[in-house]
Amino acid sequence: MSELRLRDIVQVLKDYRATFGFLDVLAGDVSEIARGEPLFTALGDDRFRADIGGAGLELQMFRDKNVARFNLVRDNAGVIGGVLAGAAAGGLVGGAVDADDRRNAPAGLIFGLLLGGLLGGVAGAAATPRPPRQVLTLRYVPEEGVWRVYHGPYLNWAKEAVRAEW
């Protein structure tokens, strides 16, 4: 079972918020998602929202790649419905996790891609050409509970496997 927690995702998004707004990770790497915990409220179209330690966290599932894209939201008013709605959404999110999503992953390594700039499918995004987007590959170090910039031998694998879409 993964040691990556939603609070770790919130923290890295806060740490890098000046440049990066989104974090992509394999859905099965997030312990609360893998366990189907009832934390999320469904917003529709594979989008979910949760309150994690007072921070609004939005999740978009990319089921074809088993990738979860997270971003912080200022207005957390979308978190409604209480435990029953959260339990139903937890089942939907957890059900998206493919047990084989790590079959080609390096054993014991958890990667994330921080993405900056506008992303397709984001509310208000225009259909005009997007500016170049910055991407930063990170590796989660569970023993320390921190993310570190990654430049190692699995860099290309991580960028392809963990990327939901550009």
Image (cartoon, rainbow, N blue to C red):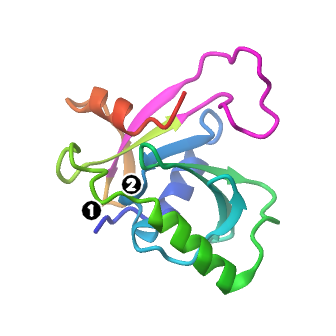
What is the quadrant of residue 51 in the picture?
Answer: bottom right
Q: In which quarter of the image is the N terminus?
A: bottom left
Structural crowding at the residue carrying mark 1, measured as other residues with C-alpha within 10 Å and reported as few (<14), some (14–19) or many (≥20):
few
Q: Is residue 162 magenta?
A: no
Structural crowding at the residue carrying mark 2, measured as other residues with C-alpha within 10 Å and reported as few (<14), some (14–19) or many (≥20):
some
- Return the x and y of residue 157 as percentages of the image width and height: 28, 31
Compared across the picture, whether 92 is left or right of 74 comes to left
Compared across the picture, whether 146 is left or right of 142 comes to right
Q: Which amino acid does label 2 sit on?
A: Val
- Return the x and y of residue 131 as percentages of the image width and height: 67, 16
Stretch in magenta = 115-140
Check disc 1 and report its element: helix, strand or loop.
loop
- Disc 2/disc 1 C-alpha distance (Å): 8 Å
The residue shown at (23%, 33%) is: 154
Compared across the picture, whether 133 is left or right of 140 comes to right
The label shown at residue 146 is 2
The label shown at residue 143 is 1
Q: Is residue 16 visible?
A: no
Q: Is residue 155 visible?
A: yes
The residue shown at (48%, 43%) is: 24
Q: What residue type is labelled 1?
A: Glu
What is the quadrant of residue 148 in the picture?
Answer: top left
Q: Which of 62 and 51 is in front in this view?
A: 62
Q: Is the magenta stretch mostly helix, strand or loop?
A: loop
- Return the x and y of residue 77 as percentages of the image width and height: 82, 66
Check disc 2 and report its element: helix, strand or loop.
strand
What is the quadrant of residue 82 in the picture?
Answer: bottom right
Compared across the picture, whether 99 is left or right of 52 comes to left
Q: How many discs appear?
A: 2
- Return the x and y of residue 96 as percentages of the image width and height: 46, 59
The label shown at residue 67 is none
